[in-house]
Structures are given as structure tokens and as C-alpha cells.
Image: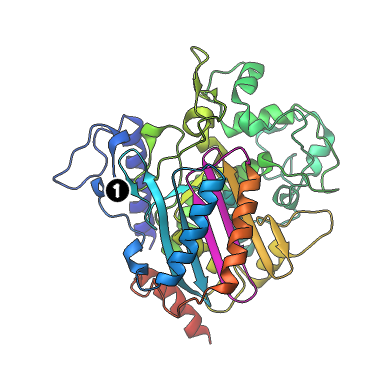
Amino acid sequence: MKNKYIIYTLISTLLTIALWLGGKVLFLSSTSTITSPELLTTSDYTEPTSFHISNSDNDTIIEIIEIIDKNLKSLFRHEFLRGGAQVAISKNGKIVYSRGFGFSNMEDSIEMQPYNTMRIASVSKLLTAVAIMHLIDEGKISLNQHVFGPNGILNDEIYQAYKDKRIGNITIKHLLNHSGGWTTRWGDPMFMPHSIARQIGKKLPISMQDIIRFMLKKRVHFNPGSSSVYCNFGYGILGEIIAKVSGMPYEDYVKSEILAPLGIYDMHIGNSFKNETLPYEAYYYEADSSACAMDYSNNDSIEYVRRSYGGTDIRTLGAAGGWTASATDLLKLTLAIDGFNDVPDILSPTSIQSMTEHQPGFDPIGWRATNGEKWYRSGTLAATCAMIARHPNGVNYVVLMNTGNHRGPELATVVKLIMDRIIPVIDLPDKDLLENDKNWQKRISLNVECQ
């Protein structure tokens, strides 16, 4: 298995280098050559490792298709959205529905397929939290372990000169439930690269380490552990903790230890510009009226770009909001952390309980809300909307969109309301779209062996 991980990591690294060099030849079939990444379509790539469901695999459930299609069309029309979406639904551990709607590439009229990937924004935090809890299950760290200071995990010299003594009290749990002490009173440091670069005297782009060093020179806004205030920065720090403890780059650890055991190989931390589009990744479509942003990487001049293409440093956002995925693969992940018995969970029951227990005044770990037996995780960026839901009746769903509008995070709430209204009135089939996915079936067989 380790050899497979090494080979996979090598292929991923080579792909990243190829994209950085300009994408002249990107792991294409032996008869294909492409000179412009902007013109790539899914047919130009060799098959990725993840098992692929296509729209045609859902053709026998016409009634469900019509209901969801009608609601999505209404949503896109009323919210002035363009682009596409994916909806994946599971019941009792089986993925019974996974379909794309609209377009992954409007310019070339390429329809959205279930295997297309999209940015998932803050849903990335759920994945980061799972990775942290996995390290806890392995006994490598603990929730109450300190992050900074001489005895902290990040005790590197570059992090020792923090201004506020309270920073030394921050624990892993504080970062996980957004109680680390930071607010966005003076802006979100994950989205202000120009200001940080100017203040620390460094050229763009800046790294996560640069952001941490910058923030450690400031005072926290409240006592760590006293309450929760949503904080992207805290999850950026968690990514550094995972790398330090595991001895692997954050992305590599998540891929090898969390995703690969679930047969998920198409999830990657994304890139910022259109010419860096990953294999099978959809294009992103903002509203025409959306405000532009400064190019996060431009040192030479002030250049304004679309927020979805160059306005955000997706790779540095990484652990807090940089992952890309298909709805199908995200649903696989959900099934492995939902606490139900149909598919073996990748975390211990204790860790799943820690992530979902309700504490007044505090956010849950990884999830956005855990209302009793209903758990939700949302994420939004420019031209990105994502929603995961786990229901107590054994039904989970994932919705991804390569578009957005002025509502921002509220759009994900609208999606949730629509799906929660649809789920009870549709008759979900008793079939498994992953019945031919050998990696996934091996995962399910673990449950049988344990019974």
C-alpha cells in the first residue's frame, strides 16, 4: 500500500510541476497533445483513479431527476446563477443518486458530470478536522495540547516571539471549534495578502507561515477557549500542525491517510488561475456584477482580476478552504464519518462524538452545525457553493455548485432549505451506484467482517 502512495504522490507532484510550467503536456493519452489548459475538456485526460459515476447511470430514476432538476432550475433562475451543480444522495450507506446539472464549461457547452470536481471552500475544514482527529486516534496529539510556546507543537523559533501571552494558552481544540481568540475585526488574514506582504516586507505571494508570523505579532481579541468566533486562520494553523506532526506535507497526509483508504483519489487542493485548472475540474462563473479583486500574486503592478480566478490564493487557503472534490467523493467521505453502521467509520466513535457534541456558545468541530442528529457543513467562495448534510434517517446528501452570487454564505443556506424539503418527498431507490467500485466495496466489507 505504501508503494501505491509513493507512486500516487510522485504522479501528483509531476502533474503540479507540469501545470506550473505552463501545461503544455498534461498526462494525456498517447495520441493527445494540448497546448492551452484553458481549452482542456475531460476527454483530453487519462482516467483518474477514483471510480466514476456518469449522468447516464441515473437514467432509470426519472422521477427523482425531474424533481431535483426542477428545483435547481428554479434556484438558478431566481438567484441569477449560471454554470452548473452536482447532487449526490446516499441512503443506508449506499450512494443511490449522483448527477450533474448545467455546465462544467459553458464556453464549450460541456455538461456537468458527477465526476467533475469543484472547489468546496470551507467544507475543507471538515476534512482538516477529520485529519486532526485521525492523528488523535493514533495517539500522536491530543485535543488539549498547546499549539505555541516552548512546549507547543509549533515550537519552531519563527513562532516564539508572539506578542500576547494568551497565545501560549491556545490548544488544538480551540482552533477546531473557532475559540482560538481571533476575530475578523481588522480583516481576515487569509484574504489580505497585499496588506500582510507590505507589513512584513516580503514580496507576494505570501505563505501560511508568513501569515502565522504576522498574526503572532498582534494581540488576540478574546481569551482563547472562552467562546467561538468563526476563524479561517485557525484552520490554516491546523494544516501546519498536521504537517509538523505527520512529517508529511498537509495535502499528502490527507490524501494518503484519509482519502486513499476510502478509494478517493480525485480530491486535491486547487489552484487560483484558470490556466491552472486541474483534470476534470469545472470552470467557475461569477455574477457579471461581482466586484473584482487585486491579483494575489502580482508584485509589479496593481492588477484587478475576478475573485474566482486570481483574487484568492487557493493553495495557501488550503486547510481552511482550498480543496476540490466531486459530490460523489465528498459523499464517500461523509459516509465514513457519519456514525452510522452501514459503512465503517474512519474515526473512532469517541472522535465522532467529540466533533458533533453540542456545547452552548461554541461551534462544533469541523461541522458548521450539529442540530441533534442533523449535521451540516457549508462552504462558499466566489463562484463556489457547497453543502453537506447528514440526516438521522440514514440519508446524507452533498450539493456542489461552480457558481455563486451576492448572497455569499446565505446561498448555501438556500440550497440546504431546498434539499431538506426535497428529501422527504422523493422515493430513493435501493441500489448502489458504487457496486462496481472495488475500493469502496472493500471498505464496506470491513463492516461485514466486524459483525
What is the residue that sits farthest to the top in this orientation? 301
In front of the other: 48 or 199: 48
In front of the other: 425 or 147: 425
| SS category of the residue bearing label 1 | helix
In front of the other: 325 or 147: 325
Q: Which residues are magenta?
A: 382-407
Q: Does any portion of residue 243 appear in the rendered image?
A: no
Residue at image location 55% in from the left, 29% down from the top: 289
**Residue at which label 1 appears:** 42
Q: Position of residue 33 (x, y in %)?
A: 18, 38
Q: Is residue 29 above or below residue 221?
A: below
Kind of residue at badge 1: Thr
In front of the other: 245 or 406: 406
Q: Is residue 387 magenta?
A: yes
Q: Is residue 370 above or below residue 218?
A: below
**Residue 94 placement, left or right of 241:** left
Q: Does any portion of residue 216 appear in the rendered image?
A: yes
Q: Position of residue 240 (x, y in %)?
A: 60, 42
What is the residue that sits farthest to the bottom in this orientation? 451
Classify mark 1: residues with Cα within 10 Å, few (<14), some (14-19) or many (20+).
some
